Image (cartoon, grey):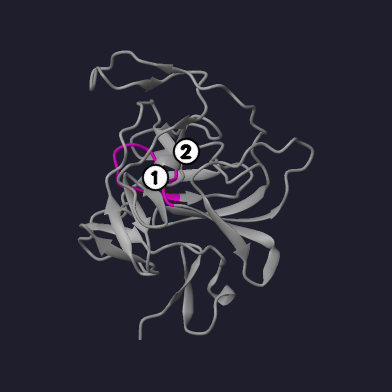
Amino acid sequence: MQVARALFSVALLFGCSRSDETRPRLELGGRSLAVPAPDDVGRACSDVADTRVCWGPGPSDVRRVERARRPASDRGLRCAGHGPAQRCEDRRFSADAFACNDAQCTQRHPRMPDDGEWECADLDGVVVCRGWAEAAGVVPGPPDPGWHCGPRAGARSERICVDFAPDRPPHEPWSCRFQYESDAPPRLCTRGGAGPLGRECAGGCPFGSVCVAERCLPLEPQPKCWVDKDCAAGQKCAHGTCREVPR
C-alpha cells in the first residue's frame, strides 16, 4: 500500500547542467507541471519505455511520435495526457529508487496506480495491476499519472491498470518481477532478458504489440483482463487487454 501523498507546488529552476545548459531542471518541491506534446496525434498517447506511442483515429492505428522536450530530473518524469494537455511529475514521488549491485536491483516500495490495494505483475516490461479495494485508514491521495485503467471483466468491483513506462533500473536490459514473500523486497530486477516493450523489433514483438518505426509498440489498451479466462473465446489477455488470437 502506498502512503497517501501530499500536494506540492511546482518549482522550476532554470540552471545549468552538463548535458544541456538551456534545459530547465525540476527541483525539490516540484510536483506536477505542464509539458505540451506538440507531436501527439490521434485520440490518445502514452510513453512506452523510452519512446512514445499514439493511437487512433482507427482502432488499429499505432504511431510512434517524438517525445516533447522535458525538464531534467535525476529519476526522470512520468507523464499523462495528450498534446497540449500533457502534464508530468518527477518519478521520485510515489515510489522508491532502486537499490542495485552488479547483478540485481530491488525496489522496496514499487509504484502503484493509487493508494488502494493492488496485486501486480511485470509482463514484457509492462506493469499490469489488479485492484480490489480502496485505501483503508488513510486519506486517499491523487492517482499516479500514466496508468491506463478499466473495470475487470466479470468482476466489476475490481480494476485493471496498465503502465507502459514503469520505473526501471538504468542500463537495460533487465528482467523484472513482483515478489510477494514477506521477507523479500516487492520488486526484483535481474540482469538480462529481451528488454521492455518499446524495444527494437529485432527478434519479433510480443503478442499485443506491433512493430512501428523499428520499435515494438502496444496496441491501444482497453484494460479489462487479469488472466485469459477473463476474455471471450478466441481471445487472450495481453498486457491487461483482451486480444484476438491470430488464426
- 231 vs 110: above or below: below
Kind of residue indicated by mark 2: Thr
Residue at image x 60%, y 42%? 143
- Percent from the top left, x then y, of residue 80? 46, 43
- 231 vs 125: above or below: below
- 113 vs 52, nearest the viewer: 52
Would you say residue 86 sits in the magenta stretch?
no
Quadrant of the image occupied by residue 68? top left
Q: Are marks 2 and 1 in contact (CB under 8 Å)?
A: no
**Dividing the image into 4 quarters, which one contains the C terminus?**
bottom left
Residue picked out by circle 2 = 106
Assign a secondary structure to mark 1.
helix
Residue 83 disc label:
1
The mark nearer the N terminus, 2 or 1, is: 1
- 171 vs 158, nearest the viewer: 158
- Percent from the top left, x then y, of residue 19? 23, 22
What whole-number distance in Å separates the C-alpha atoms at marks 2 and 1? 34 Å
Kind of residue indicated by mark 1: Gly
- Percent from the top left, x then y, of residue 131? 65, 55
Assign a secondary structure to mark 2.
strand
- Mark closer to the observer (2, 1): 1
Q: Residue furthest right?
A: 137
Residue segment shown in magenta: 164-176
